Every structure is written in structure tokens, then in C-alpha cells.
Image (spheres, rainbow, N blue to C red):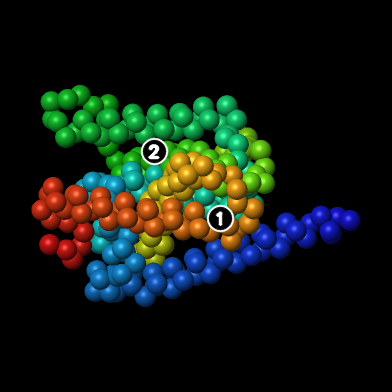
């Protein structure tokens, strides 16, 4: 009996893990190919696309950004943390098999997540004050602090949008919180801390993978919000019963996200007259 209960869980988990390993493997291979050669890295198509995703949502100030073997990250340190947090949360909940769990986290978890957002706000105000020499500031800003506080906000964004997407997408959703306890949140924060350390490791191949993952977070959060709005406005929410039915609204959400990124980049170019901060573009 226990085997019959375990089989439905083990098989999907194995498939999800296999998908993750394949994607991670491909990115690592690309990282080894590009990050070990400055010329290839400067013209890497993966980072090139990621640059445009970052350009659409981030100031990309060089001094406030990490680098991959001298090449600037697609996003600044704070935005890198935010969108890595989104990617990490979506990935963790997906791997845990909670794609249909549609309730928001309990109050205690939400309060901690709100606190994490507040910490980023405090650090952001302190950091912004350095643009104006006459304004007081509490401490000297650091990119690692921007990364950490951004990561906390990214976890909060993912923990709210993920179940919201499940609620608007699935007909046979499970009314359970996708992130159900402080213990689960702590586990997610431990994994996030490991990711932060990997960013700070200054290992080019690892940084290449994380740079791509951070840009992917931009698409993930935009696509998730687009999909929810599309289903709600069209009054077709909570109808999908399988992935084939879910594929259409999800694909439209991704296409809208790509369109929004392109539109934001074009608008920024129209206002500034140059794609400032994007390597290889005048």
C-alpha cells in the first residue's frame, strides 16, 4: 500500500528534477564555453538577451552591479537579488510539487516576508541618499547588502505570485498555502543564503548561470502577473485541468512579458538616446 501511495509522488518529482538538471547542465556548459574566454563572454548571446531584460527594469549602474569575469551583470546587485529570489521561489515550490497549491502563506509567514521587503526599503533609501552628499545616511552601502535585501524581497514576490497564479490557472487547485510555515520559509531562506554566497564567490561559470537565472526571474514574474490578469479579465480563470490547457494562457503570459520588456527598452532608448549600460551597444 505504501508503494502505491509513493509512486505518484516519486515519478513526477523525478521528471521535475531531470528537467532542472538538464537546464542547469546546459547553462553550465555554456558558462564553461563563454566565461573562460573574455572575447566570447563579451559577445555571449545568452547574456546579451539577459542584458535587455535587465535594461527594461533596472538602472544597471555599473558601480552597483556584480560582474562575470569583468562583464557587467544584466541587473544591478539589488535587482539581481530580487529576481534570483523570484526564480528560486518558483523553482523550489515547483520542485516540491505545489504547482496547484493556491493559498497565500499564513499570517506569520506574510509578516516575515513583509519585514524582508521593509529591510530592502530601508537599505534602498540609505543607498539612494548617497546620490545627494548633503543628505544624512546611516551606513555605507555595499553591493552584498543590496543583494541580500533584494533576495528577501524576491522571496516575498515569489511566495505571493506563485499561489496567485495557481488560483487563477487551475480548476482542481488545492486550497493549501504554497509556503505553509515559518519552518518552510526558513528552509527557503537557507537556500537563498547559499545562492547569495555563490554570487559572492566570484566564480565565472557559476556567476554566468546566476546571471541568466536573474534575468529569467524578470520574465517569470511578468509572465505570472500577465497570465493572472489575462485569465481574470477574460473571465476564464480556474478552468485548466491539465498542462495542455494551461499552456495557452502561460504562453500568452510569456509573450506579453517579452513584449513588455521590448517596449520598456525602446521607451528607455527613446528617452536616453542610447542603450546605456548594455555591452557592445552604442
- Give the number of marks: 2
Q: Are marks 1 and 2 in contact (CB under 8 Å)?
A: no
Q: Is residue 191 visible?
A: no
> Is residue 92 found left or right of 127 in the rendered image?
right
Quadrant of the snapshot with the C terminus: bottom left
Q: CA separation, marks 1 and 2?
A: 33 Å
Q: Is residue 137 visible?
A: yes
Question: Can you give x and y, in whole percent of width and height, for residue 64 in the image?
Answer: 25, 46
Q: Residue at left 25%, top 62%?
A: 70
- Of residues 273 and 126, the one nearer the viewer is 273
Q: Residue at left 45%, top 41%?
A: 233
Q: Secondary structure at mark 2?
A: helix
Q: Residue 153: which numbered mark, if any? A: none
What residue did someone put label 2 on? 149
Q: Residue at left 73%, top 56%?
A: 9
Label 1 packing within 10 angstroms: few (<14), some (14-19), many (20+): some
- Seen as rendered, the residue at the extreme right is 1
Question: Can you give x and y, in whole percent of width and height, for residue 251 in the image?
Answer: 46, 58
Q: Residue at left 60%, top 40%?
A: 102
> Which mark is in front, 1 or 2?
1
Q: Earlier in the sequence, mark 1 or mark 2?
A: 2
What residue did someone put label 1 on? 246
Q: Secondary structure at mark 1?
A: helix
> Is residue 140 found left or right of 97 in the rendered image?
left
Amino acid at each position: 500500500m505504501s508503494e502505491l501511495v509513493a509512486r505518484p509522488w516519486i515519478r513526477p518529482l523525478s521528471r521535475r528534477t531531470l528537467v532542472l538538471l538538464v537546464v542547469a547542465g546546459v547553462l553550465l556548459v555554456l558558462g564553461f564555453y563563454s566565461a573562460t574566454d573574455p572575447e566570447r563572454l563579451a559577445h555571449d548571446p545568452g547574456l546579451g538577451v539577459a542584458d535587455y531584460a535587465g535594461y527594461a527594469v533596472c538602472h544597471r549602474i555599473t558601480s552597483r552591479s556584480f560582474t562575470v569575469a569583468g562583464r557587467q551583470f544584466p541587473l544591478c546587485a539589488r535587482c539581481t537579488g530580487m529576481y534570483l529570489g523570484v526564480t528560486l521561489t518558483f523553482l523550489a515550490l515547483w520542485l516540491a510539487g505545489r504547482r496547484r497549491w493556491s493559498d497565500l502563506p499564513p499570517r506569520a509567514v506574510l509578516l516575515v516576508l513583509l519585514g524582508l521587503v521593509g529591510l530592502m526599503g530601508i537599505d534602498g533609501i540609505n543607498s539612494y541618499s548617497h546620490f545627494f552628499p548633503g543628505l544624512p545616511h546611516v551606513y555605507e552601502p555595499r553591493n552584498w547588502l543590496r543583494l541580500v535585501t533584494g533576495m528577501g524581497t524576491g522571496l516575498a514576490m515569489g511566495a505571493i505570485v506563485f499561489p496567485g497564479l495557481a488560483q487563477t490557472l487551475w480548476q482542481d487547485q488545492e486550497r493549501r498555502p504554497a509556503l505553509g510555515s515559518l519552518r518552510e520559509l526558513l528552509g527557503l531562506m537557507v537556500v537563498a543564503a547559499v545562492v547569495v554566497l555563490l554570487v559572492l564567490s566570484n566564480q565565472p561559470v557559476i556567476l554566468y548561470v546566476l546571471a541568466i537565472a536573474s534575468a529569467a526571474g524578470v520574465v517569470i514574474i511578468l509572465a505570472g502577473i500577465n497570465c493572472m490578469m489575462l485569465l481574470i479579465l477574460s473571465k476564464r480563470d480556474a478552468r485548466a485541468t491539465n498542462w495542455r490547457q494551461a499552456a495557452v494562457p502561460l504562453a500568452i503570459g510569456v509573450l506579453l512579458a517579452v513584449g513588455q520588456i521590448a517596449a520598456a527598452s525602446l521607451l528607455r532608448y527613446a528617452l536616453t538616446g542610447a542603450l546605456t549600460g548594455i555591452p557592445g551597444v552604442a
